[in-house]
Every structure is written in structure tokens, then in C-alpha cells.
Image (cartoon, rainbow, N blue to C red):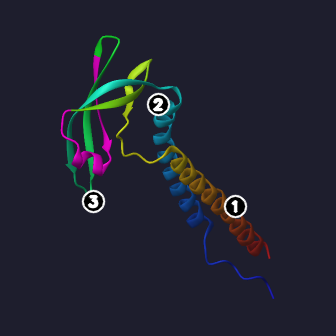
Amino acid sequence: MPPQISSKSPQAYGVFVLILLMFAFIVGKRCVPQYLIESRGIIADGTAVSTVYRGSFRGGSYFVSYDFAYNGLTYHGTSRADRDWAKGTPMPAPIKVRFIPSNPDLNLPDVAGITPLWLSILFMLVLLSLAVYNGAKAISVWRVSSNQQEL
């Protein structure tokens, strides 16, 4: 009795692998600026100018607009803000801003409501692991179907 042919096609696995890799790339691309700021950034005093709530289909987020000075120039930024901080802090408010000295436009305030870097990297690794697993599964299904056609 010949082995059963899998109902899953290698093409379906391939499409799923591409989708997983796309999401892993997006998460990884978002990690790079955060990593640079956290590892190489310096801290400056800044001022939170305003907060605003922006709604979306996922519920929305609070954002803070802020200014900080470095080398005689004033830089502006906008970032997600922690909900409790945004609702409870009168504006303008003093904040700390971490930035890259060679590119001050790459910055994050200390009130940013961002995902911790380790969690983003873990999520990216899970996506990559799933892509590798499904890629191996696609190759396995393709080999089985090729062997079935030869018989």
C-alpha cells in the first residue's frame, strides 16, 4: 500500500513562509532604530509640548510631541506615550530624551510607550522559527509528492 499523499501543497507552505518572513522583516526593521538609541544614545533634557489620542480600529494610542536641544539646535519629535502619563501630566512637562549624537533626529523620550526591545526580538525569532519549520515542511511535502509521481 503506497503512502498517502498529503493534502497540503508545497505552494501553500511556501506562501505561508513568505508571509512569516515578511512580518519578521517588519518587526526586525522596527527594532534597529530602538536598538541604536538604547545602545549608543545619550540623554538630553527636553520638554513635552502636547499629548494627543489617535484612535484606530485596534483601539488607538496616546502620542507626545516634544522638543529638545543639542549643540545649539532644537529638535522636535513625536512618539507613543504611556496612557497614564499622557492623561495625568499637565503640559508643558520636562522629560528626558535619548538620541543618537550623530543623528539627533533618531530619538525616543523616556515616556515612550514602546514595546521592550527584548520582546520584539523574541517575537521576530518566533516568526523566523515558524518560517524555517514551514519551509522544511514544504520541502518534505514536495519530496513526498515527487516520489509519488515517480511510482
Q: Give the residue type that dot 3 points to.
A: Gly
> Which quarter of the picture shows residue 72?
top left
- Label drawn at residue 136: 1
**Side (left or right) of 6 relative to 34:** right
- In terms of depth relative to the viewer, which is nearer, 121 or 43? 43
Q: Residue at x 28, y 46 (%)?
A: 85
- Residue 97: where, in percent of width, then height? 36, 29
Q: Residue at x 51, y 35 (%)?
A: 35
Q: CA distance from mark 2 to mark 1?
A: 36 Å
Quarter that holds the N terminus: bottom right
> Do the CB atoms of the residues marked 3 and 2 lie less than 8 Å apart?
no
Whether residue 83 appears in magenta in the rendering, the answer is yes
Quarter that holds the C terminus: bottom right
Segment tinted magenta in the rendering: 74-92
Q: Residue at x 26, y 60 (%)?
A: 57
Residue 21 vs 73, above or below: the answer is below
**Side (left or right) of 133 relative to 80:** right
Q: Earlier in the sequence, mark 1 or mark 3?
A: 3
Reading the image, the residue beneath label 3 is 59
Reading the image, the residue beneath label 2 is 37
- In terms of depth relative to the viewer, which is nearer, 54 or 81? 81
Q: CA distance from mark 3 to mark 2?
A: 28 Å
